[in-house]
Image (tube, coloured by chain):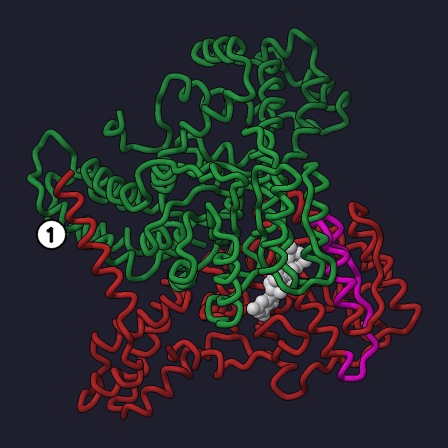
Chain colours: A green, B red
Amino acid sequence: MFENLSDRLERSFKLLKGQGKITEINVAETLKDVRRAMLDADVNFKIAKTFTDNVKEKALGQNVLSAVKPGQMMVKLVHDELAELMGSEATDINIKGSPAVLLVAGLQGSGKTTFSGKLARLLKQKRGKNPLLVAGDVYRPAAIEQLKVLGEQIDTPVYTEEGNKNPVAIAKAAIKHARQAGHDMVIVDTAGRLAVDEEMMNEIASIKKAINPDEILFVVDSMTGQDAVNTAKEFNDRLDFDGVVLTKLDGDTRGGAALSIRTVVDKPIKFVGTGEKLDALDVFHPNRMADRILGMGDVVSLVEKAQEQFDEVEAKKLQKKLARNQFNFNDFLKQINQVKKMGNLKDLAGMIPGMGKAIKDVDIDDDAFKHVEAIIFSMTPAEREDPSLLSGTRRKRIANGSGTTVQEVNRLLKQFTETRKMMKMVAQGKRIGNPQQGFRN
Amino acid sequence: MGIFGNFNSKKKENLDKGLKKTKESFFGKLSRAVVGKSKVDDDVLDELEEVLITSDVGVDTTIKIIERIEERVARDKYMGVEELNSILKEEIAGLLEENNSADVSDFDLPPSDDPYVIMVVGVNGVGKTTTIGKLAYQFKQAGKKVVIGAADTFRAAAIDQLEIWAQRVDVPLVKQKMGSDPASVAYDTVSSAKSSGADVVIIDTAGRLHNKVNLMNELSKIKRVMQKVIPVAPQEVLLILDGSTGQNAFEQAKQFTKATEVTALALTKLDGTAKGGVVLGISDQFKIPVKYIGIGEKMEDLQIFRRREFVETFFEK
Ligand SMILES: Nc1nc2c(ncn2[C@@H]2O[C@H](COP(=O)(O)OP(=O)(O)OP(=O)(O)O)[C@@H](O)[C@H]2O)c(=O)[nH]1
Ligand SMILES: [Mg+2]
């Protein structure tokens, strides 16, 4: 029902485009749209207002020269302001203590337990740590069991005390145990609690006092609305946490809460959760997030992610093929396999500049690959090399061979042609669907 | 850099002040702004806008409400403060679909030979399982025979969680192992409920984000499979929305409705400071009534949704 923030900003800026200079009137119009977009994205009411006021001040205060188009200038202003709000650099967590103690806190259902599991996995596999998970949610039915199951999946011990209903005592004992058992990291999961629940907020403050954590992380659902500021502020007042974890970003929320929280507590967002599986955890990059909100694509993330998976030589070959438009069905198959390895497709595609918009209403179904693969496997090697060979009769044969229909084969061919076109543009460094080029250089 | 630094700290200060400022009650402001005037002035409308937006009502619905009020005031000419206040809430509540069954008869069910099947759906962590526990408790209190089905076979310990609820409320639970086919669990549950002559069946499902096509298809399948036992099942598809969710709830309602034809909404976690205003627009646009609200983690913390009371909370601090 809503356009996303980047779509909207794109449109707002188009309004400005073609006008010679920034006037009070056209800035006001644009910023009204920007503000509205921010509200649709769940940015807090007051923060959205302050934000647009600031941008306006800057825009009007600047001399507009014919060298820069007003649209470009506005993009830059909005982008800079946004990036500044998001914080400047990626911030790491503190894992220096021995053992380093990490406390996880947040509202009910925000994703604390899953995050605890993901973090343990990350520290273990990528940083060579030997973590201990602590089940501190003694209230929610089967919360302890949930952490135990996750611990098993990542082969990490979970400290529990059957029947003990005092999380402060459990956390304290867990750290003692960690020392004895030679763990260098302790991750304490806690029960979800509302910021207005005095008793429960006192409890988490007591846990903090008892275990003196090296790092306290506040876990928040990225779909949170206007209340995010109140909750974050209250948790911060009580815990003075070190960082924020933004969960469920694999959804289609615009995540304005991130901006609100960041502004109101002035603490960095450190991780983002991007799926239910335990490897779906990413480090948060503030600048990239601001870029992404503006629809400029999280190019750097995409490249890094791809690098983990791609053989470099392969990639170079592909790049060349793309540029020359020689991309064929064999490459397409390879791509599918790479992409399948990389994880959530839509997520990944969304990182490609201009694609966020293009795929917004497209369903990308991982299972859909089954048919695609079947169709490609039914092609002869020559056909895979040179898709232009695919005449009507050949298509019919392929449909029969793959147990699909001619329509499906046609659809794939169309898709393929479009992908090829798009990839060629990407390979040549063109930005698709975003007229505002240039200022990032 | 110097300029930026300065600017930033000033900005922070303003923001903090804005958020901390103790609000004069909306009603107080309303009186000041409206006395002796024949139309709603901009101050009132600005204030109303802030109240609605910060309650997560969303821009579109807020504009709609403001237009309605302006129209009403223009038509009815002068109004006193009390009158305006009451009309305002009336207009806002008017966006909410009437919830036919509730308000009058709590936790009653339409008479039928087959068990009344309620399928509970929603994104991760919104409170599906807890709401099921609470609902089972209410139906049981109302003298109904309840069966619940553990069709969240995906999330770690989801089955154990529901099992604890089943024991608490003392109702039978139908389950299989973790990782088994959720549709098959749903089928088993409905069959067993039918043969044992149960009144209500409540099916838990795994939380899923609405943009995951496969998972949404899985829901449609669960629904279809139950119809093999009871053709009209599920008589109710209850979408659970977290009261602190912002505008994304719209997309949730849209996609879950597409996959399962949602018939009712439940709004959870209203014991916090979030207002859940996004349901105004959802209820209005999709013509789905809000049936229940969750106001805590205990068995008894479920209430029938009342429109007017809900709207009142927007105007409380
Ligand atoms: N304060 C409060 N907490 C609630 C309410 N309803 C549910 N919760 C809590 O929210 C958390 C998540 O609830 P669950 O019932 O497990 O949510 P779910 O939708 O089944 O979660 P998944 O199955 O993991 O997708 C738990 O800690 C519940 O105790 C409510 O009305 N108020
Ligand atoms: Mg559940």
Please tell me in which quarter of the rendered image ligand 2 is found. Answer: bottom right
A96 left or right of A372 in image: left
Going by the image, does B109 lie left or right of B272? right
The amino acid at mark 1 is Glu
Label 1 marks a residue whose chain is: A
Residue drawn 54% across the image and 40% down it: A99
Q: Quadrant of residue A276?
A: top right
Q: Nearer the viewer, residue A195 or B286?
A: A195
Q: Is residue A100 above or below residue A315?
A: below
Spot occupied by residue A380 in the image (x, y as percentages of width and height)? 70, 10
* Residue A232 in sight in this render: yes
Left or right of residue A330, residue A236 in this image = left
**Residue that protrudes farthest toward the right in the picture:** B195
- Which residue is painted at 40% across and 36% down in the image? A285
Q: Nearer the viewer, residue A282 or B289?
A: A282
Name which residue lies at 13% across and 41% down: B2
Bounds of the magenta segment: B140-166
Residue B163 colored in magenta in the image: yes
Name the residue that disc number 1 marks. Answer: A24
Would you say residue A222 is visible in this rendering? Answer: no
Taking B274 as reference, is A44 above or below it? above
Look at the image and say whether residue B311 sits in the magenta stretch.
no
* Residue B135 % position (x, y): 70, 73
Estimate how packed mark 1 is, as few (under 14), some (14 to 19) or many (20 or more) residues with alpha carbons within 10 Å: few
Quadrant housing the C terminus of chain A: top left
Q: Residue at x 48, y 53 (%)?
A: A220
Check the picture and name the quadrant holding the N terminus of chain A: bottom left
Q: Position of residue A324 (x, y in %)?
A: 44, 9
